[in-house]
Amino acid sequence: MNEFELGDLVQMRKKHPCGTDKWTIIRVGADIKIRCQGCGRIVMMDRMEFVKRMKKVLAHSEVPVRGTNEEEWPYVQQ
Ligand SMILES: [Zn+2]
């Protein structure tokens, strides 16, 4: 069972065409949004699908990622 949260670095089962399998979680809600570490592409999927596709959490974020890229940052609605 993988616990994941906003800002975590995760490894996906399938590699992105750009060659990396590492993604950062940039939104957690009913849908999960992740950003490719290799090319910066953002992909959204529902939670079930994300859990299925994720291999493991590589690193938990200790500092909120918020603000690093304000333009693209989707605020989580509670
Ligand atoms: Zn990529």
Image (cartoon, grey):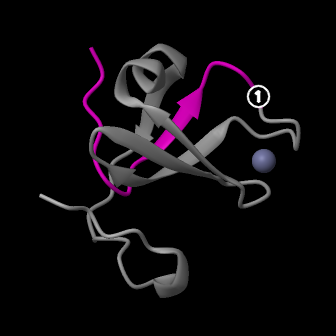
What are the residue bounds of the magenta stretch?
1-15
Compared to 49, does 78 lie above or below? below
Residue 62 placed where, x, y %? 26, 63
Taking depth in this image into account, of 70 and 4 the one nearest to the observer is: 70
Residue at the image position 67 percent from the left and 54 percent from the top: 37
Of helix, strand and loop, which mostly describes the magenta segment?
A: loop
- Does 67 sit left or right of 30 as displayed? right
Q: Residue furthest left?
A: 78
Residue at the image position 37 percent from the left and 19 percent from the top: 48
Taking depth in this image into account, of 75 and 64 the one nearest to the observer is: 75
Residue 49 placed where, x, y %? 47, 20
Q: Amino acid at mark 1?
A: Lys
Count of marks overlaid on the render: 1
Residue at the image position 63 percent from the left and 41 percent from the top: 22
Residue 45 placed where, x, y %? 50, 34
User: Image quadrant for the N terminus?
Assistant: top left
- Does 7 sit left or right of 70 as displayed? left
Compared to 2, does 36 lie above or below? below
The quarter of the picture where residue 42 lies is: bottom right
User: Image quadrant for the C terminus?
Assistant: bottom left
- Does 70 sit left or right of 12 as displayed? left
Does residue 13 show up magenta in the picture?
Answer: yes
Taking depth in this image into account, of 72 and 54 the one nearest to the observer is: 72
Compared to 30, does 38 lie above or below? below
Residue 25 placed where, x, y %? 44, 50
Graded by Cα atoms within 10 Å as few (under 14), some (14 to 19) or many (20 or more), the crowding at tag 1 reads: few
Residue annotated with mark 1: 15
Does residue 25 show up magenta in the picture?
Answer: no
Element type where label 1 sits in the image: loop
- Does 13 sit left or right of 38 as displayed? left
Taking depth in this image into account, of 23 and 75 the one nearest to the observer is: 75
